[in-house]
Amino acid sequence: MVERPLTLMAVHAHPDDEATGTGGVLARYAAEGIRTVLVTCTDGGCGDGPGGVKPGDPGHDPAAVAAMRREELRASCEVLGIGHLELLEYADSGMMGWAANDAPGSFWRTPVEEGAARLAELLKQYKPDVVVTYDENGFYGHPDHIQANRITMAALEMTGMTPKVYWTTAPRSQMQRFGEVMREFGGDWEEPDPAEAAALAEIGLPDEEITTWVDTTAFGDRKFDALAAHASQGENIFFLKMGKERFTELMGTETFVRVQDTTGAAVPENDLFAGLR
């Protein structure tokens, strides 16, 4: 019998999400010979159009934006060495509170059980050993990120499969550093009002609650290039202003919280596949 390869599946909401939070682990594990699978749930149609035209503005064509972002996504996958790309192609729901949330076909409006059933088929096809997605708040409250978490956890329950499951996160100790770097490179990072500060304080986790710290510095250039492949969204990717060296310094460790495990691997850990190899 042919031995089944160790497999990592990442479930993301939009084109470019794969690079921001998990580009390092996807590139690292692909280079180590692990099969990598990316599931992208939406078409990204609420992204910027050519020339930076914004959703809702004259000339913004969601279908054209989605087609453009699909090609950018394929380019990013090539940079990261992702072996398999699966597109669910639900309509991008936009930010929380946008009219697009409730548009026909939007991911946010899709019943969880429907999306979960489609993802369950992919779980059964690829049989991943590790699954990565967002936390229950979608990291920062984006409806499509929240929905990606919901369908992932529901699909795992449907299948009864028990891979190691991780949610992406960030150490709160780094949030101040992010703000400093954004200001240094001209990012729009003003001191938040008390309500915004309270919301920001809920992003990520205290360092001691993070279970998994993966060193991906050797793949910082690939992560940078994968983000750069999403050129149409460059206005929103301030990280690209840093250059590869500073980018890798800031983004060279990817952090996760482990929420399902049958290996008994001790935490904190430095490998998503700890206990599996």
Image: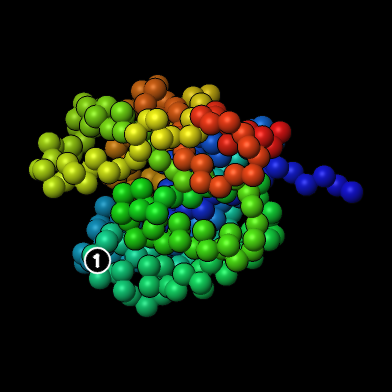
The residue closer to the viewer here, 133 or 84, is 133
x, y percent for residue 9: 59, 49
Residue 197 visible: yes
x, y percent for residue 126: 68, 55
x, y percent for residue 154: 52, 63
User: Is residue 195 placed above or below 218 in the rendered structure?
Assistant: below
The residue closer to the viewer here, 43 or 179, is 179
Give left or right: position of 117 versus 107.
right
Residue 68 visible: no
The residue closer to the viewer here, 273 or 38, is 273
Residue at figure coordinates x 21%, y 36% from the top left: 187
Give left or right: position of 28 versus 12.
right
Q: How many marks?
A: 1
- Quadrant for the C terminus, please: top right
x, y percent for residue 49: 31, 57
Residue at figure coordinates x 40%, y 54% from the top left: 136
Q: Which residue is mark 1?
A: 98
